[in-house]
Image (tube, rainbow, N blue to C red):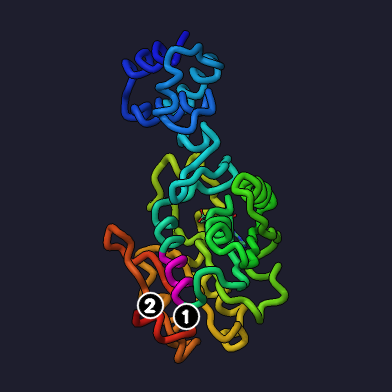
């Protein structure tokens, strides 16, 4: 059977689970085609592994996220390896990565020799993305899950960058905190299962999702670092749940008086990011 025949066969079965995008991605991956246009060039080639494709189609139809079926997820226009041990990177996290990148350039310049920590790195997307843009930086990715760090290391190899991975609870693996310039984290922050869609709940790692209380990780990260001890200029960038602005403002105002921070909205207008910085110019920029 050719890719063309299989493509039109699968198209007939298109439904809300198996949409056209999913068919394209599944076929692309079978032949390692870089994109759909590349696949079209090979439309009359025999399908490499028809049985595997049909099995994968069934998995997608059964509700499994396409990214886990193909083993890849896109993050800011690039592919990253994912499996059931890591969260599938989300659009908001792409926004965090791009927003932070701009801030780093403003505060530290285009290719600074700074130390960057990604806490709760999962597949490694944030740390690896930053390392690609700032090759002179030292990037340390931490996670409590050894399996996550295995995927993170595979992604570093895929992206041809050198990062360091350290396993442990929140900031425990970081002993040399003083010279850190950037801390980025998208920690677990979901309060309870009622707000999570059934597909995420069934397939994605709960370790990556839930925190009790919801602000636990932010509090522990801030508690673990003495903001005065960080390097002369620093940025702490967090992804947050949209309902957290008041709680986090209260924590910052009561325990970290004088600290400069700002909340930012995502493209949907929801408050999803918190930046804490040492450099007033950046906050008001
Ligand atoms: C929301 S996911 C974020 C993954 C990735 N940074 C991203 O944005 O796609 C949170 C990550 O925190 C990790 N994690 C959970 N509890 C942790 C802890 N106590 N210490 C360090 N990492 C933890 C999970 O394993 C998971 O990879």
List x then y, in percent, for residue 64.
47, 33
Which residue extends farthest top?
1
Q: Is residue 104 magenta?
A: yes
- Name which quarter of the figure residue 138 lies in: bottom right
List x then y, in percent, for residue 37.
39, 28
The residue identified by callout 1 is 277
Residue toward you, 265 or 76: 76
Q: Which residues are magenta?
A: 99-106
Ligand 1: which quarter? bottom right
Q: Are marks 1 and 2 in contact (CB under 8 Å)?
A: yes
Measured in 3D between alpha carbons, the distance from the residue under mark 1 to the one under mark 2, in whole angstroms, is 9 Å
Q: Is residue 20 above or below residue 206?
A: above
Please, what secondary structure does the residue beneath circle 1 have? strand
Which residue extends farthest left?
269
| Magenta stretch: helix, strand or loop mostly | helix
List x then y, in percent, for residue 3.
44, 15
The residue identified by callout 2 is 262
Q: Is residue 2 visible?
A: yes
Q: Is residue 262 magenta?
A: no
């Amino acid at each position: 059977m050719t890719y063309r025949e299989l493509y039109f066969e699968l198209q007939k079965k298109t439904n809300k689970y198996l949409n056209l995008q999913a068919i394209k991605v599944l076929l692309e991956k079978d032949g390692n085609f870089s994109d759909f246009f590349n696949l079209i060039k090979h439309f009359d080639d025999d399908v490499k592994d028809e049985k595997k494709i049909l099995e994968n189609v069934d998995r997608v139809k059964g509700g499994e996220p396409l990214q886990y079926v193909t083993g890849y997820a896109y993050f800011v226009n690039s592919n990253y390896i994912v499996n059931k041990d890591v969260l599938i990177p989300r659009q908001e996290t792409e926004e965090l990565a791009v927003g932070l990148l701009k801030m780093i350039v403003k505060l530290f310049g285009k290719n600074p020799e700074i130390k960057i920590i990604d806490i709760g790195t999962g597949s490694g997307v944030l740390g690896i993305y930053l390392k690609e843009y700032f090759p002179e930086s030292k990037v340390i990715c931490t996670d409590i899950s050894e399996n996550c760090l295995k995927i993170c290391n595979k992604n570093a190899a895929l992206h041809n960058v050198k990062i360091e991975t350290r396993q442990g609870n929140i900031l425990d693996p970081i002993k040399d905190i003083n010279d850190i310039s950037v801390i980025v984290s998208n920690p677990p922050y979901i309060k309870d299962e009622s707000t999570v869609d059934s597909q995420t709940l069934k397939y994605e790692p709960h370790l990556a999702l839930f925190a009790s209380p919801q602000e636990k990780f932010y509090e522990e990260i801030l508690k673990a670092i003495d903001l005065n001890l960080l390097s002369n200029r620093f940025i702490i960038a967090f992804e947050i749940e949209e309902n957290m602005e008041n709680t986090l403002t209260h924590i910052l105002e009561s325990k970290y008086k004088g600290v400069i921070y700002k909340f930012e909205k995502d493209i949907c207008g929801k408050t999803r990011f918190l930046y804490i910085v040492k450099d007033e110019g950046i906050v008001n920029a």
